[in-house]
Amino acid sequence: MLVAAAGAGILGAWAEGALLLFLFSLGHALEHLAMDRARKSISALADLAPRMALVRRQGKTREIPVEELQVDDIVLVKPNSKISADGIVVKGSGAVNQAPITGESVPVEKEPFPSDQRIPSD
């Protein structure tokens, strides 16, 4: 950028050199603005996730940090609560608001996964 502006100055095209510096500076400022917005959006999305999960292990229900969740844990989801982990419905049914993840504004009905089918392992 500086080389191009200096070259424009050497050729006597001061206005073009100044315009070049201005446009590069504007682009740099817009890039920083976009990065700051992206960081804030990602941070806000992370804040949507619950920190605790209600888990049933060995017949007992207790609240644990989501970091302690294990594969095959049964996570209880109460009405109007946030879902703390990805998984399948094993019992009960209901509508889930997936807007923070998919952007879909209409709640999606969830039913128990059929026990005679193999669970997908994506």
Image (cartoon, rainbow, N blue to C red):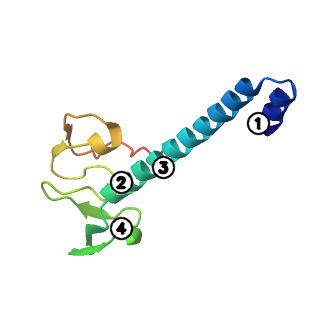
Residue annotated with mark 2: 44
Residue closest to the eye, 34 or 58? 34
Give neighbour class at mark 2: few <14, some 14-19, many 20+ (Cα, 10 Å): few
- Which sits earlier in the primary sequence, circle 4 or circle 1? 1
Residue at 25% x, 50% y: name it: 89
Residue at disc 4, secondary structure: helix
Where 116 falls versus 63 (above or below)?
Answer: above
- Which sits earlier in the primary sequence, circle 3 or circle 1? 1
- Which sits earlier in the primary sequence, circle 4 or circle 2? 2
User: Among all residues in the image, which is located at the extreme left?
Assistant: 79
Residue annotated with mark 4: 66
The kind of residue on which mark 1 rests is: Met
Q: Which mark is residue 1?
A: 1
Gap in Å between the C-alphas at discs 1 and 2? Answer: 36 Å
Mark 4 vs mark 1, foreground winner is: 1
Gap in Å between the C-alphas at discs 4 and 1? Answer: 49 Å
The kind of residue on which mark 3 rests is: Asp
Give neighbour class at mark 3: few <14, some 14-19, many 20+ (Cα, 10 Å): few
Is the C-beta separation of discs 4 and 1 under 8 Å? no
Please give left or right for residue 68 compared with residue 64 in the image.
right
Q: Quadrant of residue 49?
A: bottom left
Residue annotated with mark 3: 36
Please give left or right for residue 122 compared with residue 44 in the image.
right
Q: Which mark is residue 88?
A: none
Give neighbour class at mark 1: few <14, some 14-19, many 20+ (Cα, 10 Å): few
Gap in Å between the C-alphas at discs 3 and 1? Answer: 24 Å
Mark 4 vs mark 3, foreground winner is: 3
The kind of residue on which mark 2 rests is: Ala
